[in-house]
Image (tube, rainbow, N blue to C red):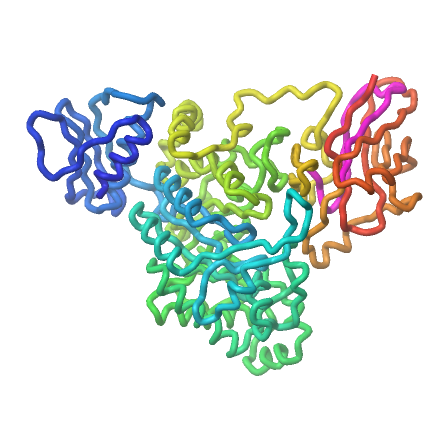
Amino acid sequence: LVGKYLSDLLLKSRGFGVAAGSRHPATHSTIVFARGDSDLGPEGYTLDVTPTGVRIAAPTDAGLFYGAVTLWQLMTADGRRGPMMLQPLHIEDRPRFAWRGLLLDSARHFQSPTFVEHMIDWMALHKLNVLQWHLTDDQGWRLEIKRYPRLTSVGAWRPGIDRKTGRPIRYGGFYTQAEVQRIVAYAAARHVTIVPEIEMPGHSLSAIVAYPQMGAAPADPKTRGDWGIFPDILDPSDRTYGFMTGVLSEVMDLFPGPWINVGGDEAVKDEWRASPKVQAQIKQLGLANEDALQGWFTARIGGFLAAHGRRMIGWDDILVGGAGLPADAATVSWHADGALKATSAGHDTVIATDPLLYFDHRQSDLVGEPPGRGIVVSLADVYGVEPVSPTMTPEQAAHIIGVQANLWTEHMPTEADVARMAFPRAAALAEVAWTATALKNWESFEARLPGELKRYQPLGLAEDQPAVAPTTIVPPITRRYSQQLELCTNKVSLNLAGVTDAQQAQPYLVDIMNPCWISPRAELGGRTVRVAVTRLPFNFQLGADAAKIVLHPPTTPAGELEVRVDGCTGDPVLRLPLANAAESRNVTVLSGQLPALAGMHDLCFTFTQRKLDPMWVIAWAELGS
Ligand code: ACM
């Protein structure tokens, strides 16, 4: 099996395969896969190249598989097609961590089964071995559950906008159980374990829209295309427990791996606080508060999974409720203090810290980066991640079972977007996850990167280009795109995609909590300023934080772009009316004359408007002569 896999890979990469068989023809050099004992652990292997051939030995199929991947890497190191020479060598190799993961969010945007299989292929060739598959969230339920057909007939769809026509459409999709079985088998053949994630009790709006009786309060289905954190939460009742264990029964049938992820993050408990029924339940159970109720609910689900021989894993938020979780429950640490909390309580944990392991952040500050969250997480940033804090005791460190990067897809509507945000950063992640600390070396990684990118082409993998650009592009002197301006604040900065085709020329970098940009240090002296502006939907569920956004009152009905010098308060030097721009779905260029000031000055741009939605943003600003 592994011989055929290697042969197919070589055919793609070099243009020739190798004949697979069980006999050794005496006249040819051979590649031998040998099962045998070794002390290299369950995924380790040895690889020997000698004048008579190649020998890969490992105690497990996984070890043989990783040996084959290494051989493919050796045979593709020159990036060329056709014959090649291998130099004699001896390799002993084993991974540092057992869990080498990527999370794929198929809930915010749906990816085709074929693309999911591509991701699994690409992961396997980086020796990544766990796919946390985020199958449910507020915006969509993606897994067919035969008991509850409305989860997909209703929950898999939300109102959307057709990019071409701007018209409303029904947007979404789901995976049938037959498709999931195929994907799980495809992953198993590549030694990738899929860990399904079914969110509860928060991030469950799609389930509540499909089955309103599962909600703690009535839901408003109209907002379901928004990003952010919705207030909707499951009712922690026996009925919901019965429903969710029914879901999990089918999930366990589909996913044979040891782990089931139950989400648990960001459960907003306002509805529980407001519900007399839930308050009575808290009293009756003798619980301290709503957090303890989440702990009780999660522990109950954990008991169900344990009784069926599975291990529960959830976001580090599942620790909020205190004791009661199964002792072998594990967490995915996305908060900075998550690993310390989990390991101190004796739970295993996977390191997936925000922002460095959140691959929805942009990879550079270049204009050509695809949309994403605003903090820059570069290839070098990812390579530098050390999953085990030096302050941990050996007992705590032993609970760090691995490392994972998360591909949240709010800002990745297409499969090409997902691939670009994942790669090449997943190559850096792979070395964090696999390579012994003493052997990690950024300069070596950087030197090997061009060869790695050449391997991607025949695999159909199109990585992010700006992330590997050798030098930054020198911006034109006069025009600065939003990515080249400074944000006045960095509260929730996003590199947002436009909606209409005309808006899509480049993303828009904006702090949605404070849309305000500074163009630093320029000679203004009586020049004109031209600013390209447009409006984007404000589709973010921010809860109480929405009240912290300051709206500047307009002086004309459609509002203005206000331009200030050397600061963002005080009287503007220019007020450019937005009346024409407000009529347009495209980008509109405003212009005005700056005062005659000597020397270098900063310009600050803000908008006036009466409501949050839609939100004005800047595409670029430039100074005229
Ligand atoms: C998360 O980012 N809510 C896990």
What residue appears at the point 26 percent right and 36 percent down from the top-left corner? 6
- Residue 262 appears in the picture as rendered: yes
Tell me if residue 353 is in the magenta stretch: no
What residue appears at the point 72 percent right and 48 percent down from the top-left corner? 537
Residue 595 lies, with reference to residue 144, above or below; the image says: above
Side (left or right) of 34 relative to 268: left
- Of the pair 260 and 146, the residue shown nearer to us: 146
Give coordinates of residue 541: x percent, y percent: 68, 56
Give coordinates of residue 500: x percent, y percent: 68, 41
Residues drawn in magenta: 508-534
- Of the pair 223 and 356, the residue shown nearer to us: 223
Which image quadrant is residue 68 in? top left
Instruction: Tell how many labels.
Output: 0
Give coordinates of residue 475: x percent, y percent: 67, 21
What residue appears at the point 23 percent right and 46 percent down from the top-left corner? 61
- Judged from this view, the residue extending furthest toward the left is 26
What residue appears at the point 54 percent right and 77 percent down from the top-left corner? 237
Give the quadrant of the C terminus. Answer: top right
Residue 224 lies, with reference to residue 391, above or below; the image says: below
